[in-house]
Image (tube, rainbow, N blue to C red):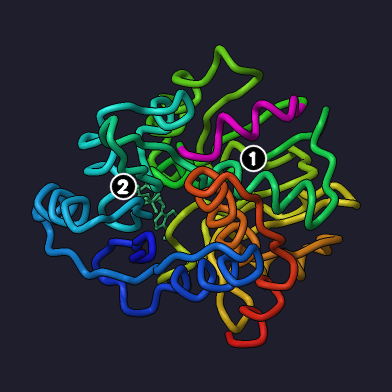
Amino acid sequence: MPMDKYAVIGNPIAHSKSPFIHAAFAEQTGQSLSYTAELVEIGKVPEFIEQFRANGGRGLNVTVPFKLDAWQIAEQLSERAQRAGAVNTLSLNDKGIAGDTTDGVGLVNDLSHNHQLDLQNRNILILGAGGAVRGILEPLLNLSPAQLVIANRTVEKATQLADDFSDLGHITGCGFDDLAGEKFDLIINGTSASLSGELPPLPDNILQSSAACYDMMYGANDTVFMQWARQQGAKKVLDGLGMLVEQAAESFFIWRGVRPQTQSVIKLLRQQL
Ligand code: ATR
Protein backbone atom coordinates (compact mmCIF):
# COMPACT_ATOMS: atom_id res chain seq x y z
CA MET A 1 0.00 0.00 0.00
CA PRO A 2 1.36 3.48 -0.79
CA MET A 3 2.25 5.64 2.21
CA ASP A 4 -0.10 8.45 3.24
CA LYS A 5 1.24 11.70 1.84
CA TYR A 6 1.66 14.97 3.73
CA ALA A 7 3.60 18.15 2.97
CA VAL A 8 4.25 21.72 4.05
CA ILE A 9 3.69 24.45 1.47
CA GLY A 10 5.24 27.92 1.55
CA ASN A 11 7.36 30.36 -0.40
CA PRO A 12 10.23 30.21 0.42
CA ILE A 13 10.23 26.71 1.93
CA ALA A 14 13.73 25.25 1.50
CA HIS A 15 14.75 25.78 5.14
CA SER A 16 11.55 24.38 6.66
CA LYS A 17 12.13 22.09 9.63
CA SER A 18 8.69 20.51 9.31
CA PRO A 19 9.81 17.46 7.23
CA PHE A 20 12.38 16.64 9.91
CA ILE A 21 9.88 17.12 12.74
CA HIS A 22 7.13 15.01 11.15
CA ALA A 23 9.56 12.26 10.16
CA ALA A 24 10.66 12.12 13.79
CA PHE A 25 7.02 11.99 14.98
CA ALA A 26 6.18 9.24 12.47
CA GLU A 27 9.14 7.13 13.52
CA GLN A 28 8.42 7.61 17.20
CA THR A 29 4.74 6.68 16.89
CA GLY A 30 5.18 3.94 14.27
CA GLN A 31 3.03 5.73 11.70
CA SER A 32 3.73 5.07 8.05
CA LEU A 33 3.67 8.35 6.12
CA SER A 34 5.71 10.63 3.90
CA TYR A 35 6.11 14.37 4.54
CA THR A 36 7.84 16.71 2.11
CA ALA A 37 8.40 20.48 1.73
CA GLU A 38 6.83 21.93 -1.41
CA LEU A 39 7.58 25.31 -2.92
CA VAL A 40 4.35 26.73 -4.32
CA GLU A 41 4.18 29.75 -6.61
CA ILE A 42 2.27 32.76 -5.33
CA GLY A 43 -1.30 32.53 -6.62
CA LYS A 44 -1.03 28.80 -7.36
CA VAL A 45 -2.19 27.39 -4.01
CA PRO A 46 -5.64 26.16 -5.16
CA GLU A 47 -4.15 24.28 -8.12
CA PHE A 48 -1.45 22.77 -5.95
CA ILE A 49 -3.91 21.53 -3.34
CA GLU A 50 -6.18 20.03 -5.98
CA GLN A 51 -3.32 18.15 -7.58
CA PHE A 52 -1.82 17.03 -4.26
CA ARG A 53 -5.19 15.67 -3.21
CA ALA A 54 -5.74 13.93 -6.56
CA ASN A 55 -2.36 12.23 -6.06
CA GLY A 56 -3.41 10.83 -2.71
CA GLY A 57 -2.31 13.70 -0.44
CA ARG A 58 -3.95 13.48 3.00
CA GLY A 59 -2.88 16.71 4.66
CA LEU A 60 -0.90 19.92 4.35
CA ASN A 61 0.79 22.34 6.65
CA VAL A 62 0.71 25.87 5.37
CA THR A 63 3.28 28.54 6.14
CA VAL A 64 4.17 32.07 5.04
CA PRO A 65 2.70 33.57 2.88
CA PHE A 66 -0.23 31.19 2.31
CA LYS A 67 -2.10 30.99 5.64
CA LEU A 68 -4.84 33.33 4.47
CA ASP A 69 -5.14 31.51 1.12
CA ALA A 70 -5.61 28.25 3.02
CA TRP A 71 -8.25 29.87 5.21
CA GLN A 72 -10.16 30.92 2.09
CA ILE A 73 -9.79 27.55 0.36
CA ALA A 74 -10.88 25.41 3.32
CA GLU A 75 -14.45 24.14 2.96
CA GLN A 76 -14.83 23.59 6.69
CA LEU A 77 -13.06 25.64 9.37
CA SER A 78 -12.51 24.81 13.03
CA GLU A 79 -13.81 27.45 15.40
CA ARG A 80 -10.32 28.54 16.37
CA ALA A 81 -9.27 28.86 12.70
CA GLN A 82 -12.39 30.86 11.97
CA ARG A 83 -11.41 33.44 14.55
CA ALA A 84 -7.69 33.37 13.84
CA GLY A 85 -8.33 34.23 10.19
CA ALA A 86 -5.56 31.84 9.23
CA VAL A 87 -5.09 28.14 8.55
CA ASN A 88 -1.83 26.24 8.98
CA THR A 89 -3.27 22.70 8.83
CA LEU A 90 -5.41 21.27 6.05
CA SER A 91 -6.94 17.80 6.17
CA LEU A 92 -7.85 16.39 2.78
CA ASN A 93 -10.43 13.63 2.80
CA ASP A 94 -13.59 12.35 1.13
CA LYS A 95 -15.66 15.02 2.85
CA GLY A 96 -13.57 17.84 1.42
CA ILE A 97 -10.90 20.23 2.70
CA ALA A 98 -10.93 20.99 6.42
CA GLY A 99 -8.87 23.87 7.83
CA ASP A 100 -7.49 24.33 11.34
CA THR A 101 -4.83 26.42 13.05
CA THR A 102 -2.42 24.94 15.56
CA ASP A 103 -0.02 27.88 16.08
CA GLY A 104 -1.81 29.25 19.12
CA VAL A 105 -2.24 25.93 20.87
CA GLY A 106 1.41 25.22 20.02
CA LEU A 107 2.50 28.37 21.83
CA VAL A 108 0.30 27.67 24.83
CA ASN A 109 1.52 24.08 25.11
CA ASP A 110 5.11 25.26 24.95
CA LEU A 111 4.51 27.89 27.65
CA SER A 112 2.42 25.67 29.92
CA HIS A 113 3.93 22.20 29.53
CA ASN A 114 7.53 22.70 28.41
CA HIS A 115 8.23 25.83 30.47
CA GLN A 116 5.73 25.30 33.30
CA LEU A 117 4.35 28.84 33.16
CA ASP A 118 1.02 29.31 34.91
CA LEU A 119 -0.65 32.27 33.26
CA GLN A 120 -3.89 32.38 35.19
CA ASN A 121 -4.38 35.88 36.70
CA ARG A 122 -1.11 37.05 35.15
CA ASN A 123 -0.45 40.20 33.16
CA ILE A 124 0.56 39.36 29.62
CA LEU A 125 1.95 41.78 27.06
CA ILE A 126 2.02 40.92 23.38
CA LEU A 127 4.14 42.92 20.97
CA GLY A 128 2.72 43.21 17.45
CA ALA A 129 -0.75 43.03 15.94
CA GLY A 130 -0.24 41.13 12.69
CA GLY A 131 -1.43 37.73 11.51
CA ALA A 132 0.90 35.83 13.84
CA VAL A 133 -0.54 37.59 16.89
CA ARG A 134 -4.17 37.15 15.81
CA GLY A 135 -3.56 33.39 15.82
CA ILE A 136 -2.44 33.19 19.45
CA LEU A 137 -5.02 35.39 21.19
CA GLU A 138 -7.85 32.89 21.70
CA PRO A 139 -5.74 30.12 23.29
CA LEU A 140 -4.00 32.69 25.51
CA LEU A 141 -7.28 34.20 26.67
CA ASN A 142 -8.53 30.68 27.43
CA LEU A 143 -5.84 30.53 30.15
CA SER A 144 -7.69 33.32 32.04
CA PRO A 145 -4.90 35.86 32.41
CA ALA A 146 -5.65 38.96 34.53
CA GLN A 147 -5.20 41.02 31.39
CA LEU A 148 -3.77 40.75 27.94
CA VAL A 149 -2.29 43.92 26.46
CA ILE A 150 -1.43 44.19 22.78
CA ALA A 151 1.12 46.90 21.95
CA ASN A 152 1.81 47.79 18.35
CA ARG A 153 3.66 50.40 16.31
CA THR A 154 0.42 51.10 14.43
CA VAL A 155 -1.83 51.63 17.43
CA GLU A 156 -5.17 51.24 15.59
CA LYS A 157 -4.28 47.68 14.60
CA ALA A 158 -3.77 46.81 18.27
CA THR A 159 -7.04 48.36 19.41
CA GLN A 160 -8.95 46.75 16.54
CA LEU A 161 -7.51 43.33 17.37
CA ALA A 162 -8.38 43.77 21.05
CA ASP A 163 -11.94 44.69 20.05
CA ASP A 164 -12.22 41.55 17.91
CA PHE A 165 -11.41 39.31 20.91
CA SER A 166 -12.94 41.33 23.76
CA ASP A 167 -15.74 38.81 24.27
CA LEU A 168 -13.16 36.21 25.37
CA GLY A 169 -11.51 38.09 28.22
CA HIS A 170 -9.84 41.26 29.42
CA ILE A 171 -7.88 42.49 26.41
CA THR A 172 -6.74 45.98 25.39
CA GLY A 173 -4.63 47.51 22.63
CA CYS A 174 -2.14 50.39 22.84
CA GLY A 175 1.10 51.86 21.50
CA PHE A 176 4.59 51.17 22.89
CA ASP A 177 4.71 54.59 24.61
CA ASP A 178 1.69 53.68 26.71
CA LEU A 179 3.55 50.84 28.43
CA ALA A 180 5.68 53.01 30.73
CA GLY A 181 4.83 52.35 34.37
CA GLU A 182 3.09 49.01 33.68
CA LYS A 183 4.38 45.64 34.94
CA PHE A 184 4.06 42.32 33.15
CA ASP A 185 4.61 38.67 34.08
CA LEU A 186 5.06 37.57 30.47
CA ILE A 187 5.99 39.44 27.31
CA ILE A 188 5.57 37.68 23.97
CA ASN A 189 7.24 39.18 20.92
CA GLY A 190 4.97 38.53 17.96
CA THR A 191 6.34 41.29 15.73
CA SER A 192 8.41 40.48 12.69
CA ALA A 193 11.01 42.98 13.97
CA SER A 194 13.40 40.20 15.09
CA LEU A 195 13.76 39.11 11.46
CA SER A 196 15.49 42.39 10.66
CA GLY A 197 17.34 42.57 13.97
CA GLU A 198 15.14 45.38 15.25
CA LEU A 199 13.66 45.88 18.69
CA PRO A 200 10.26 47.47 19.32
CA PRO A 201 10.77 50.64 21.40
CA LEU A 202 10.02 49.27 24.87
CA PRO A 203 10.32 51.29 28.08
CA ASP A 204 12.61 50.00 30.85
CA ASN A 205 11.30 48.40 34.03
CA ILE A 206 8.12 46.80 32.71
CA LEU A 207 9.01 43.28 33.92
CA GLN A 208 7.86 41.78 37.20
CA SER A 209 10.75 40.20 39.11
CA SER A 210 9.68 36.69 38.06
CA ALA A 211 8.81 37.64 34.48
CA ALA A 212 9.32 35.50 31.40
CA CYS A 213 9.98 36.82 27.89
CA TYR A 214 9.18 34.75 24.82
CA ASP A 215 10.16 35.50 21.22
CA MET A 216 8.04 33.64 18.68
CA MET A 217 11.14 33.62 16.43
CA TYR A 218 14.11 31.34 17.01
CA GLY A 219 17.65 30.98 15.81
CA ALA A 220 21.14 29.86 16.81
CA ASN A 221 21.62 33.11 18.72
CA ASP A 222 19.43 35.28 20.93
CA THR A 223 17.20 37.72 19.05
CA VAL A 224 17.51 41.41 19.97
CA PHE A 225 14.31 41.06 21.99
CA MET A 226 15.85 38.19 23.96
CA GLN A 227 18.99 40.29 24.55
CA TRP A 228 16.77 43.12 25.81
CA ALA A 229 14.95 40.67 28.11
CA ARG A 230 18.22 39.50 29.66
CA GLN A 231 19.34 43.11 30.20
CA GLN A 232 16.03 43.82 31.93
CA GLY A 233 16.54 40.86 34.27
CA ALA A 234 13.86 38.48 32.95
CA LYS A 235 13.76 35.24 34.93
CA LYS A 236 13.14 33.14 31.82
CA VAL A 237 14.14 34.07 28.27
CA LEU A 238 12.64 31.76 25.67
CA ASP A 239 12.52 31.44 21.90
CA GLY A 240 9.90 29.97 19.59
CA LEU A 241 11.53 26.64 18.76
CA GLY A 242 9.24 24.81 21.17
CA MET A 243 6.20 26.50 19.61
CA LEU A 244 7.29 25.26 16.19
CA VAL A 245 7.48 21.66 17.39
CA GLU A 246 4.27 21.91 19.43
CA GLN A 247 2.22 23.28 16.51
CA ALA A 248 3.55 20.40 14.42
CA ALA A 249 2.55 17.91 17.11
CA GLU A 250 -0.99 19.28 17.14
CA SER A 251 -1.20 18.98 13.32
CA PHE A 252 0.10 15.43 13.55
CA PHE A 253 -2.58 14.67 16.14
CA ILE A 254 -5.32 16.12 13.90
CA TRP A 255 -4.21 13.96 10.99
CA ARG A 256 -3.24 10.73 12.72
CA GLY A 257 -5.12 10.76 16.03
CA VAL A 258 -1.86 10.09 17.88
CA ARG A 259 -0.04 12.60 20.07
CA PRO A 260 3.75 12.48 19.63
CA GLN A 261 6.27 13.30 22.35
CA THR A 262 7.87 16.66 21.65
CA GLN A 263 10.76 17.05 24.12
CA SER A 264 13.24 14.83 22.30
CA VAL A 265 12.45 16.48 18.96
CA ILE A 266 12.91 19.98 20.40
CA LYS A 267 16.27 18.85 21.80
CA LEU A 268 17.41 17.42 18.46
CA LEU A 269 16.42 20.59 16.61
CA ARG A 270 18.18 22.76 19.17
CA GLN A 271 21.40 20.85 18.56
CA GLN A 272 21.08 21.49 14.82
CA LEU A 273 20.56 25.28 15.02
P1 ATR B 1 2.97 38.38 10.69
O1 ATR B 1 2.14 37.52 9.80
O2 ATR B 1 4.35 37.84 10.96
O3 ATR B 1 2.27 38.75 11.94
P2 ATR B 1 2.42 41.00 9.70
O4 ATR B 1 0.97 40.70 9.67
O5 ATR B 1 3.06 41.75 8.57
O6 ATR B 1 3.28 39.69 9.83
O7 ATR B 1 2.72 41.78 11.06
C1 ATR B 1 3.99 42.21 11.42
C2 ATR B 1 3.93 42.83 12.82
O8 ATR B 1 5.25 43.22 13.22
C3 ATR B 1 3.10 44.10 12.87
O9 ATR B 1 2.51 44.19 14.14
C4 ATR B 1 4.16 45.20 12.68
O10 ATR B 1 3.79 46.45 13.19
P3 ATR B 1 2.84 47.44 12.31
O11 ATR B 1 1.46 46.88 12.40
O12 ATR B 1 2.95 48.77 12.95
O13 ATR B 1 3.39 47.39 10.91
C5 ATR B 1 5.28 44.62 13.51
N1 ATR B 1 6.62 45.13 13.17
C6 ATR B 1 7.36 44.85 12.08
N2 ATR B 1 8.57 45.46 12.13
C7 ATR B 1 8.58 46.16 13.30
C8 ATR B 1 9.55 47.01 13.94
N3 ATR B 1 10.73 47.24 13.40
N4 ATR B 1 9.22 47.56 15.14
C9 ATR B 1 8.01 47.31 15.70
N5 ATR B 1 7.06 46.53 15.14
C10 ATR B 1 7.35 45.96 13.96
What is the number of the mark on residue 67?
2
In the image, residue 21 sits, relative to residue 192, either above or below, namely: below
Instruction: Identify which amino acid the numbered label 1 is placed on.
Output: Leu
Is the CB–ligand 1 distance for label 2 below 8 Å?
yes
Which residue occupies the foreground of this view, 245 or 161?
Answer: 245
Query: Circle 1: is it few (<14), some (14-19), or many (20+) Cα within 10 Å?
Result: some
Give the residues in magenta. 135-145
Q: Which residue is mark 1?
A: 179
Which residue occupies the foreground of this view, 167 or 265?
Answer: 265
Placement of the N terminus among the 4 image quadrants = bottom left
Q: Residue at x 51, y 21 (%)?
A: 165
**Nearer-N-terminus badge (1/2):** 2
Mark closer to the observer (1, 2): 2
Q: Main secondary structure of the magenta part?
A: helix
* Dots 1, 2 in contact, CB < 8 A: no
Q: Position of residue 150 (x, y in %)?
A: 55, 36
Q: Residue at the right extreme? A: 209
Q: Position of residue 101 (x, y in %)?
A: 45, 40
Element type at marker 1? helix
Instruction: Identify which amino acid the numbered label 2 is placed on.
Output: Lys
Query: Circle 2: is it few (<14), some (14-19), or many (20+) Cα within 10 Å?
Result: many
Which residue occupies the foreground of this view, 161 or 246?
Answer: 246
Q: Is residue 195 left or right of residue 173?
A: left
Q: Position of residue 11 (x, y in %)?
A: 24, 66
Q: Quadrant of residue 34?
A: bottom left
Rounded to the nearest angstrom, the CA distance separating label 1 from label 2 is 31 Å
Q: Would you say residue 140 sits in the magenta stretch?
A: yes
